[in-house]
């Protein structure tokens, strides 16, 4: 009877070890798939952001071509087109991931103003929802 108990105990330990190994394997596979999905979603968001950036640069080019070239309006048109072009280039180069990193860095460097901006945005949203 002692042998049967020892064999059952050993068999239960082996089964538990096997189940634990399989659980680790499944968890690892699931984590890898989640990481891959996250990467592909981030890549898709970056590609979409790059397309938006390209579109903004196109608008800047059209503004330069079709807008006034002389005087105060020409100067204003040129500055707006330059700003649009820089913004479009930024979106193309950095993508959504880079923008998130930049925003995180900005918040870390300026926590109090970031907190105040967050409170202000929260107030505006709450005020708009209360009216609606």
Image (spheres, grey):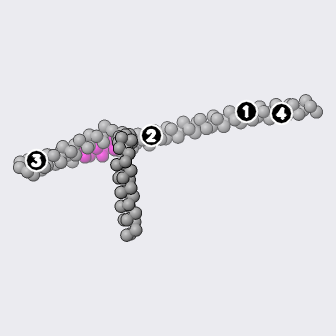
Q: Is residue 93 visible?
A: yes
Above or below, 60 against 27 in this view is below
Tell me the tag on residue 40.
2
Q: Earlier in the sequence, mark 2 or mark 1?
A: 1
Tell me the tag on residue 9.
4
User: SS class of the residue under badge 3?
Assistant: helix
Tell me where residue 128 appears, x and y as whole percent: 36, 65
Measured in 3D between alpha carbons, the distance from the residue under mark 4 to the one under mark 2, in whole angstroms, is 46 Å
Label 3 close to label 1 by CB (< 8 Å):
no
Above or below, 46 against 131 in this view is above
In the picture of the structure, the residue carrying the numbered disc 3 is 75
User: SS class of the residue under badge 4?
Assistant: helix
Q: Residue at x 82, y 31 (%)?
A: 10
Measured in 3D between alpha carbons, the distance from the residue under mark 2 to the one under mark 1, in whole angstroms, is 34 Å
Badge 1, how many Cα within 10 Å: few under 14, some, many 20+?
few
In the picture of the structure, the residue carrying the numbered disc 1 is 17
Which stretch is magenta?
49-58
Q: Residue at x 44, y 43 (%)?
A: 41
- Nearer to the camera, 125 or 30: 125
Q: Going by the image, does 34 lie left or right of 13? A: left
- Displayed quadrant of residue 48: top left
């Amino acid at each position: 009877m002692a042998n049967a108990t020892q064999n059952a105990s050993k068999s239960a330990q082996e089964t538990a070890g096997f189940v634990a190994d399989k659980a680790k394997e499944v968890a690892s596979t699931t984590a890898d798939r989640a990481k891959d999905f996250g990467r592909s979603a981030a890549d898709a968001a970056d590609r979409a952001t790059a397309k938006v950036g390209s579109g903004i640069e196109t608008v800047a080019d059209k503004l330069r071509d079709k807008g006034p070239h002389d005087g105060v309006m020409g100067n204003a048109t040129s500055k707006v087109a330059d700003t649009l072009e820089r913004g479009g280039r930024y979106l193309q180069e950095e993508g959504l991931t880079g923008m998130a990193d930049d925003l995180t860095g900005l918040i870390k460097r300026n926590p109090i103003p970031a907190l105040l901006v967050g409170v202000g945005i929260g107030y505006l949203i709450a005020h708009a929802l209360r009216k609606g």
